[in-house]
Structures are given as structure tokens and as C-alpha cells.
Amino acid sequence: QVQLVESGGGLVQAGGSLRLSCAASGRTRSNYAMGWFRQAPGKEREFVAIINWSGGYTYYADSVKGRFTISRDNAKNMAYLQMNSLNAEDTAVYYCAATFTISTIATEYTYWGQGTQVTVSS
């Protein structure tokens, strides 16, 4: 089992930045990729970004490419999502998740955090 806890969400003005963190505990020696998803009110959960175990591979949704950066620090059992140039369309609950594959599909992820709210005011 891997437990994930997100933090760093909040209210930010359009054009601003936030850095989300995801702390992992439990079976952290397993080689899992970390992903970030988000879900806006009335919408389905959507993929945002993924990073593999070593950090050498990353992939982003087109909607965040060039603005968001995913990273991880395995020594600290942490993953991060740096979000720049935020706009109102980025408002959502953001979730970190762990998968033993490389996927943009939510059902391929085994472990999930509880989510952190990001609200961008225009």
C-alpha cells in the first residue's frame, strides 16, 4: 500500500503560480510512476501530467504543456507540480496518484490522494 497526501492548493489570481506537493508513505520502495489529475465541478477527472520512477520521462496534457512542470524527489518520497501562468480554466481539485505503468488513464492508477483545491480568480 502507498498512501498519498497532497498539499499546496489555494486561491491565486490569474497569471499567478502555485506549487503542489504530494507526500508518499508506506510501500515507497516500489518503482511507481506518479501522476497528477484534476477534476473541475461538473466535469470528469482529467489527466494533467506524469513522471516515471527515475524522473527521466515526463508527459503533459496539451492544456498545461509549457506552464506546468512535474518533478519528484525519491529520497524524500515527494512529487511536485509547479503550476505557472494559471488561468480560470485550471480551477479544480488536483489529485496525485501512483501507477505501476505509464498511463494517462485514471483507472490505470492504483493509489490516490484525497485531493487539494486550486482556485484561480480572474
Image: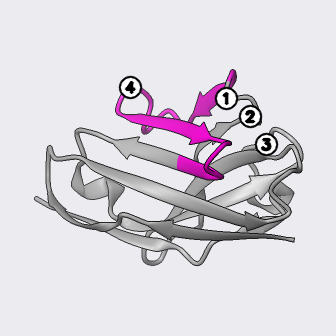
Residue type marked 2: Asn
Between disc 2 and disc 4, the foreground one is 2
The residues tagged by marks 1 and 4 sit, at their Cα atoms, a distance apart of 17 Å
From the image, tell me which residue sits under label 3.
103
Q: Is residue 75 magenta?
A: yes
Give the mark, 2 or 4, whose residue is nearer the N terminus. 2
Neighbour class for label 3 at 10 Å: few (<14), some, many (≥20)?
some
From the image, tell me which residue sits under label 1.
55
Q: Quadrant of residue 122?
A: bottom left
Helix, strand or loop under label 4: loop
Between disc 1 and disc 4, the foreground one is 1
Residue type marked 4: Gly
Give the mark, 1 or 3, whose residue is nearer the N terminus. 1
| Residue occupying the far top of the picture | 56
In x, y percent, where is residue 105? Answer: 76, 51
Give the mark, 1 or 4, whose residue is nearer the N terminus. 1
Identify which residue is drawn at 50% across, 32% down: 62
Identify which residue is drawn at 82% across, 46% down: 32
Q: Are marks 2 and 3 in contact (CB under 8 Å)?
A: no
The residues tagged by marks 2 and 1 sit, at their Cα atoms, a distance apart of 5 Å
Residue type marked 3: Ser
Helix, strand or loop under label 1: loop
Helix, strand or loop under label 2: loop
The residues tagged by marks 4 and 3 sit, at their Cα atoms, a distance apart of 20 Å
Neighbour class for label 2 at 10 Å: few (<14), some, many (≥20)?
many
Magenta part of the chain: 56-79
Helix, strand or loop under label 3: loop
From the image, tell me which residue sits under label 2.
52
